[in-house]
Image (cartoon, rainbow, N blue to C red):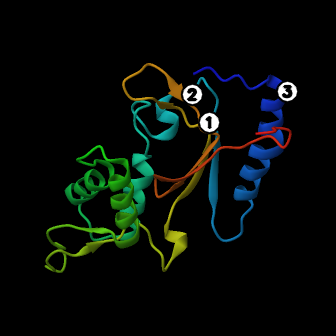
Amino acid sequence: AADKTPPHVKMDEKNHVEEPFLQQLENMPGLHWQVLRLDNYQAPDETQRTDFTQVFMRKDLTAALKKINPWLEEDQLQEVVEKITHFENDNLLQNNELALQLLLNGTTVTENRTTGEKSPNVSIVDFDHPENNSYVAVSQFKVRIPGTDNHIYPDIICFLNGLPVVLVECKSPKTKE
């Protein structure tokens, strides 16, 4: 669907809502947000993707998992990434519930090869040491709509350890809706 928002309102959203929000993230004490400001001509590799159907940032996810769980070996890292990013069914509610449980509780691998511990927990988010997590906000993150050649450009998506956790659609103060 074509965006019918008049240009003067769009500019207002960008300058008066989206940009101040991004600046606030950049200047937030304690959590070091990286902000990527993209446009319609972006390439997938600007956001660690091979194509626009992907919705997570693989490099950030892998790096965070390794930092939080330094005992994981390369094949285990890939196994965990696969568990976190590929869901078996198409039920959006169930997939969101599963994603929330993974974020809160983590997952497991067969064994910690350093200690021999069986089925050790793998944390996806470090709640005790937030500085171990990665925080990235992307404006205009291009995503291909499945089954079409069309794309959407959410105003801001906030990624925690390479995973999209917040979507922000900015609205102009002038908009009556």
Q: Quadrant of residue 131?
A: bottom right
Q: Residue at x 34, y 53 (%)?
A: 95
Disc 1 to disc 3, how far (Cα)? Answer: 18 Å
Give left or right: position of 135 versus 92.
right
Q: Residue at x 56, y 37 (%)?
A: 141
Instruction: Tell me the element at label 3.
Output: helix
Residue 66 visible, this angle: no
Q: Residues within 10 Å of mark 1 (few under 14, many from 20)?
A: some
Measuring from the top left, give residue 51's x and y in whole percent: 41, 30
Q: Secondary structure at mark 1?
A: loop
Q: How far apart in space, not on screen, are marks 2 and 3 (Cα)?
A: 23 Å
Q: Mark 1 is on which residue type?
A: Gln
117 w.r.t. 45: above or below: below
- Disc assigned to residue 140: 1
Q: Does residue 177 lie above or below 83 as drawn?
A: above
Q: Which residue is mark 3?
A: 8
Q: Is 154 on the left-hand or right-hand side of 79? A: right
Residue 168 locus on image (x, y percent): 63, 48
User: Which disc number belongs to residue 166?
Assistant: none
Estimate how packed mark 2 is, as few (under 14), some (14 to 19) or many (20 or more) residues with alpha carbons within 10 Å.
some
Single out the mark in the foreground, 2 or 3: 3
Quarter of the image with the N terminus in it: top right
152 sits left or right of 145 in the view? right
Evaluate if marks 2 and 1 touch, with contact meaning CB atoms under 8 Å apart.
yes
Q: Residue at x 52, y 35 (%)?
A: 46
- Which quarter of the figure is the C terminus placed in? top right
Q: Earlier in the sequence, mark 2 or mark 1?
A: 2
Residue 2 in view here:
yes
Q: Earlier in the sequence, mark 2 or mark 3?
A: 3
